[in-house]
Image: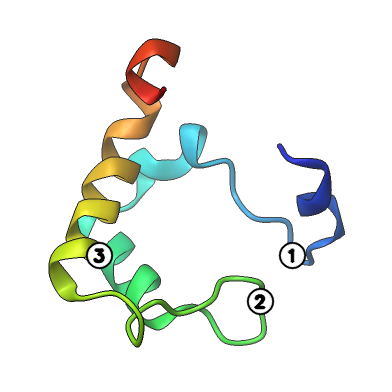
């Protein structure tokens, strides 16, 4: 976890551990709309849907990714 994330309340989830709990459509929605009163911003105004689906696909794949694949 990045040091700056320790100041966020609530603490953001560790995506490498929790991404499997969410469906891709849920991750897409979170990325597009954000979560009010948290540190999760919305990216719908600055990213098109295709980009947001790519982000959702990346997050879903993250738990099984090697360090080399991540890089």
Dots 2, 3 in contact, CB < 8 A: no
At x 79%, y 67%, the residue is 9
Is residue 60 shown left or right of residue 14? left
Q: In this figure, which residue is indicated by the disc labeled 3?
A: 52
Is residue 47 shown left or right of residue 14? left
Count the marks: 3
Q: Is residue 23 visible?
A: no
Q: Label 3: how many residues lie within 10 Å, few (<14), some (14-19) or many (20+)?
A: many
At x 66%, y 72%, the residue is 39
Dots 1, 2 in contact, CB < 8 A: yes
Residue 30, given in percent of the width and then of the height, sits at 38, 71
Query: Secondary structure under badge 1?
Result: loop
Q: Label 1: how many residues lie within 10 Å, few (<14), some (14-19) or many (20+)?
A: few
Rendered image: mark on residue 50: none
Residue 71, given in percent of the width and then of the height, sits at 41, 22
Q: Label 2: how many residues lie within 10 Å, few (<14), some (14-19) or many (20+)?
A: few
Q: How is the image coloured?
A: rainbow
Is residue 38 shown left or right of residue 43? right
Q: Earlier in the sequence, mark 3 or mark 1?
A: 1
Is residue 52 shown left or right of residue 68? left
| Nearest-to-viewer mark from 3 and 1 | 3
At x 35%, y 87%, the residue is 45
User: Measured along the vertical axis of the image, is residue 43 above or below residue 13?
Assistant: below
User: Measured along the vertical axis of the image, is residue 27 above or below residue 38?
Assistant: above
Residue 56, given in percent of the width and then of the height, sits at 27, 54
Rendered image: mark on residue 38: 2
User: Measured along the vertical axis of the image, is residue 62 above or below residue 71?
Assistant: below
Rendered image: mark on residue 10: 1
How far is disc 2 from disc 3 in space, using C-alphas? Answer: 19 Å
Residue 37, given in percent of the width and then of the height, sits at 66, 85
């Amino acid at each position: 976890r990045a040091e700056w994330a320790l100041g966020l309340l609530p603490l953001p989830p560790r995506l490498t551990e929790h991404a499997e709990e969410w469906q891709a459509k849920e991750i897409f929605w979170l990325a597009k709309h954000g979560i009010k009163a948290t540190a999760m911003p919305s990216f719908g105004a600055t990213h098109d849907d295709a980009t947001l689906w790519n982000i959702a696909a990346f997050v879903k794949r993250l738990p099984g990714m090697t360090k080399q694949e991540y890089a």
